[in-house]
Amino acid sequence: MRQNCLFTADQTERERKKREIFLPEKGQLSEIRTTKREMGRAPCCDKTSVKKGPWSPEEDAKLKEFINKHGTGGNWIALPHKAGLKRCGKSCRLRWLNYLRPNIKHGEFSEDEDRIIYSLYASIGSRWSIIAGQLPGRTDNDIKNYWNTKLRKKLLAMLPSFQKKPSFHQSIPLQSSPLSDHHKYSDNFLNTSSFYNNSNFMNVSNSLLTTTGSSIVHDHMNVTDLFVPPPSNPLTGMISNNNYYPGFQGDQSMNKECYYPEVKERMLMFGGGGELSTTCSSSDGGGSCMSQISYNKYDHHRIKQEDQFSLQWFGDQRHAFMTDHNYVDQKPKGYFKNHVNPLHINLEEVKQLTVINNNSSSSVNISSYLMNDDDENKTTHILTDGCYMMIDGSN
DNA sequence: AAGCCTACCAACCGCCGGCCT
DNA sequence: CAGGCCGGCGGTTGGTAGGCT
């Protein structure tokens, strides 16, 4: 699995300087590639002679014609030269995958697609290529943009009540936000560290949809508090701190031990050697590549924190979230309904899960009110109800 | 009409992992 | 086995259209 890109400004700067040093002159790429063996990374192409920026219809036509005739040849770097394009190979690849290849679907996303994106984001985070693999005709870039510009706002519309009461862990520094700066700064709520460090907001939402009957969570708790351990550890009496979860609070090594083996085990049990394999619509020219991510217990240091939290939710539609934080019946036994490994959940299963949620008499249909962005008060109200139902443990 | 602001999205950047030599 | 090359991916940027003042 890819690691989250958590590079310091220093590292980025070093990389930039490395590249600057080796910016090729026209026609010197091969020579520079030789140099690279001694001194570092080579640029993927001769950046001084490639065109950047929007593609013209002529360039599109050239690329399309070439690929239709010859295919990609398995070498994007060489392709632009062969096709007579003054473009970087990566640029060609992107243009083809995101715009020119057949069966690309542009335009409005359907509510079904929205639901799938919500669900998958909740389960696997920002693995856009994997999400795209479940939405035929959509590209990872499209979905990423759609999420950042629209879907996220729909969620924001239902969240304002969360920030009324600051959570005690809000002072935790922001480790890594999936948002660009101008997004971060324009969304006050999302800019709170607790949001990103301690929850995946779909986790919040989906967890709120279910009732557990648990009375352990008290009604004075803020929703965001649900994503941190209780202040006092019932087993040790210690005040919980950020070592509670591996990777918590900017721990990029991801190897701090969890205080509770059961909890740790449950965070990792999604692996068990299991793998997620899915068709990846945007990963090759024909939309047929296989993307794989694997979580197993030997690889757990590399599981992103956001995944750990989100995976909890997928573990069990009704109980995972609550029990994780309340030390109630933490045995993995029977944790997955029908032995479903969440990482094997496909599109149909995601839909089924949504249906399960929707049909449950004691749950609230998130999809229905996520669409309700024209009525923020109503949305908030519904959410509050859902929250109350769960927190109060009413039946 | 002009200037500013915001939203959108195509494209780029830079890193990682896997394949190949 | 080591190291280079390339494709793939997620994060980010920047241009532009449209709305607002």
Image (cartoon, coloured by chain):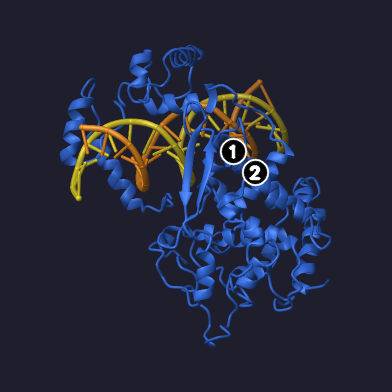
Chain colours: A blue, B orange, C yellow
Badge number at residue A143: 1
Label 2 chain ID: A
Picture quadrant where residue A33 is located: top left
Q: Nearer the viewer, residue A297 or A95?
A: A297
Mark nearer the viewer, 1 or 2: 2
Residue A189 is at least partly visible in this image: no
Residue drawn at point x = 74 percent, y = 60 percent: A209
**Image quarter (top left, top right, bottom left or bottom right) of the C terminus of chain A:** bottom right
Picture quadrant where residue A117 is located: top right
Residue drawn at point x = 22 percent, y = 20 percent: A27
Question: How far across and down, in percent of the image, does residue A184 sit?
Answer: 55, 51
Same-chain status of marks 1 and 2: yes
Q: Of marks 1 and 2, which one's residue comes earlier in the chain?
A: 1
Give above or below for A164 relative to A15. Answer: below
Q: Amino acid at mark 2?
A: Leu
Give above or below for A387 relative to A58. Answer: below
Residue drawn at point x = 51 percent, y = 44 percent: A277
- Secondary structure, mark 2, is helix
- Secondary structure, mark 1, is helix
Question: How far across and down, in percent of the image, does residue A56 sit?
Answer: 49, 16
Q: Nearer the viewer, residue A42 or A116?
A: A116
Label 1 chain ID: A
Tell me: A163 left or right of A343: right
Q: Amino acid at mark 1?
A: Ile
Callout 1: 10 Å neighbours few (<14), some, many (20+)?
many
Badge number at residue A63: none
Q: Which residue is mark 2?
A: A347
Question: How far across and down, in percent of the image, does residue A386 sit?
Answer: 78, 63
Distance between mark 1 and mark 2 Cα atoms: 16 Å
Residue drawn at point x = 46 percent, y = 57 percent: A273
Tell me: A329 left or right of A157: left
